[in-house]
Amino acid sequence: MVNRIAVIFDFDETLAPDSTSSFLEGLGIDVEDFWANKVTPMYKEKGWDPIPAYLYKMIELSASGDEGTRITKEKLAAFGKEITFFNGAHAIFKKLRAVAQEVNPKVEVEFFLLSSGIRDILVNTKIAKYFKDIWACDFHYNAKGEIVFPKNIVSFTDKTRFLFQISKGIFGPDSRFNPFEVNKKVDVLYVPFNQMIVIGDGQTDIPLFSLIDKQKGIPIAVYDPDDKRKWGKAWEFVQDERVKNVVPADYGKKSALNHMLEMAVTKIATTLKIAESSYHR
């Protein structure tokens, strides 16, 4: 029996506002124009996958701009350090571990970050230290530290691959040098899917929601309560029966999301405690 719970977060619009848009805005880029007139036609008219499409347009933007709009590893890292999060997000990690320990002292709660955003932003945030691993899109940089090519892409179904890596215990720096290790057969899972909780907000999270729901894990969809444009997308998750749980992205002590996460951790920790008691009878 594995006394472990994995909590997997998306980042943009889940833990914080869209980091890529905020970064571009800080460079003086018209963000609405970037997404609507540069990125969207790439996949609606030219057949690109949406994720490499936005990365390509960032590279194109950086190469064609002046010094102020050049995108570098240093600028991405510096921006990550300044990101502010949704209410209470920075405190949720210790809180959920404490909840699990109160129910079942043998249970460990581990956190993972799985995003289609930019990894060099995310690994430099104040909450990066709480995650066992962070998977997101990477750039290759030239000698000046400027972005020149997508190195790793995390798109729709790519995210499910990393759920399998988590389930098999394949993560950490060394795992990046052996991408085929995810295909190996293991006798004991590091954490079963039904002991996973997935929190996300967007279209790239739908494959995760579907997989976790089918495997009896707990998917939770969130939306920005201050942006009514995002409410319709959240409602579609319910209509399409992607998830049963849709709440505002507010992690405050009395928020619905905080309560839902506590209940989810409590449910799994209690189930593990009961199963262990039955095993030892």
Image (cartoon, rainbow, N blue to C red):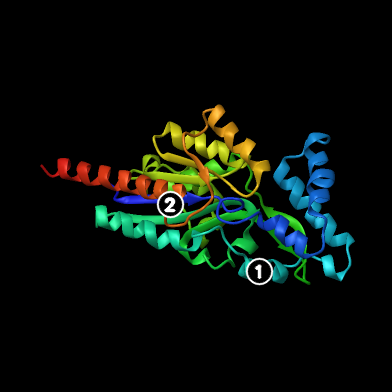
N-term-proximal mark, 1 vs 2: 1
Label 1 sits on a secondary structure element that is helix
Give residue 92's position: percent from left, percent from top: 44, 59
Q: In 3D space, how far apart are the residues under numbered discs 1 and 2 (Cα atoms)?
A: 29 Å
Crowd rating for badge 2 (residues with CA inside 10 Å; few <14, some 14–19, many 20+): many
Label 2 sits on a secondary structure element that is helix
| Residue tagged 1 | 77
Res. 48 mark: none
Give residue 180's position: percent from left, percent from top: 53, 47
Q: Which quadrant of the figure contains the C terminus?
A: top left
Q: Residue at x 76, y 60 (%)?
A: 24
Left or right, 82 with respect to 64, comes to left
Left or right, 264 with respect to 139, comes to left
Left or right, 118 with respect to 160, comes to right
Crowd rating for badge 1 (residues with CA inside 10 Å; few <14, some 14–19, many 20+): some
Instruction: Give, as a three-letter code, the residue at label 1.
Output: Ala
| Residue tagged 2 | 258
Q: Residue at x 62, y 50 (%)?
A: 226
Q: Nearer the viewer, residue 158 or 40?
A: 40
Instruction: Give, as a three-letter code, the residue at label 2.
Output: Asn
185 up-or-down from 6: above or below: above
Give residue 145's position: percent from left, percent from top: 75, 70
Give residue 171's position: percent from left, percent from top: 48, 55
